[in-house]
Amino acid sequence: MNFTPRFIAASDGTRLRAAAFPASPETQGICVLLQGQTEFIEKYDEVIAELNARGFTVATFDWRGQGGSSRGLDNPLPAHVRDFAQYDADLASFLAQVVRPLGGAAPLVLAHSMGAHILLRTLHDKPQAFRAAVLSAPMIAVSARGYPGWLARGVTAAYSLAGRGRDFAWGMAARDPFLITFDTQLVTSDRERFAKAQKFLGDHPELRLAGPTWGWLEAAYRSMARMQRPGYAEAIATPALVCGPGKDRICLTAATESFARRMPNATYLEIADSEHEILMENDSIRARFWSAFDNFVARLG
């Protein structure tokens, strides 16, 4: 994947790596692509090509702390933010500096996992930002890996209050891509696509990211709790297609379905045999996603 990235400044000066991939011809306008935690622009080369083939010019960027954007800690491997409002600001800066200058009507947006979570915050607070949204495995609630949710939340709060917010959460240093194998990863059933991403990170180790800090988890729990308040989902009126993976081991699909069914203009699709990363799954799963995507876009008119 060859492209020349553009670096923009977030509102606090954080450097964000962004890129736009024009369609030829552009018949569908702009699609904003929002990645999940630990990801980077190049991981989505196949998705970008598929969107271009559908007539979408694609605009995307790396969130702060990952990919080619500035890292917030001296150690570049932990994922860390103080508050998810920092991600909100990143998205706002990206829209203002990269997307709006491209012109045209409000864009479509395709977002995955953490990116879909941040998107929902924006759809709630800025309902005119996007004309429609497609969400893959949005982070509504996360798996506590066999522990009660209240316990995971309490331990996270305790470590943050104890001044350990910048430390890796338990087991998260081991999520370094250099330590993960296909048999220990939790996100896809497709060996070839997993191997492709791993090889790219081996060739470009500066883009890799491990798991989150206690501070990141605390910020995530606060944001997820905000989303569960009565009336939050009901206030998101943007037309949306919400896709839940039936075999997700990262996010809780039942919570995703419940949230989507509270959104007044959302359609929910569960892909029963998909792991967390629908867009990085096998061809059969991806074909079902793209069929639903195409039908959703066609209905928008």
Image (cartoon, rainbow, N blue to C red):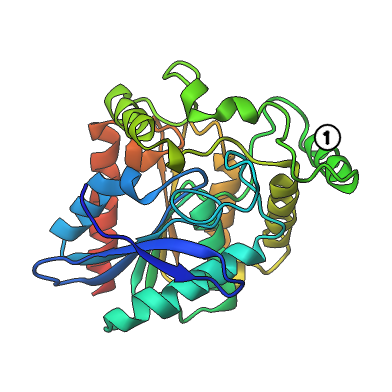
Instruction: Please tell me in which quadrant of the rendered image residue 95 appears.
Output: bottom left
Quick check: can you spot residue 264? no
Instruction: Please tell me in which quadrant of the rendered image residue 108 appears.
Output: bottom left
Q: Nearer the viewer, residue 294 or 184?
A: 184
Q: Residue at x 32, y 82 (%)?
A: 101
Q: In the displayed orientation, state which residue is furthest to the top.
A: 183
Looking at the image, residue 270 lies above or below residue 63: above
Q: Residue at x 72, y 35 (%)?
A: 169
The C terminus - image quarter: bottom left
The spot of residue 28 in percent (x, y) is: 19, 71
Q: Residue at x 54, y 79 (%)?
A: 126
| Residue position for label 1 | 151
User: For the residue marked with disc 1, what is the amino acid?
Assistant: Leu
Q: In the displayed orientation, state which residue is furthest to the front.
A: 74
Judge the density around disc 1: few (<14), some (14-19), many (≥20) Cα neighbours within 10 Å. few
34 to the left or right of 163: left
Q: Nearer the viewer, residue 259 or 45?
A: 45
Q: How many marks?
A: 1
Instruction: Please tell me in which quadrant of the rendered image residue 232 appears.
Output: bottom right
Q: Residue at x 45, y 18 (%)?
A: 181
Quick check: can you spot residue 83? yes
Q: Nearer the viewer, residue 106 or 178?
A: 178
The spot of residue 88 in percent (x, y) is: 58, 68
Q: Nearer the viewer, residue 160 or 154?
A: 160
The spot of residue 218 in percent (x, y) is: 75, 49
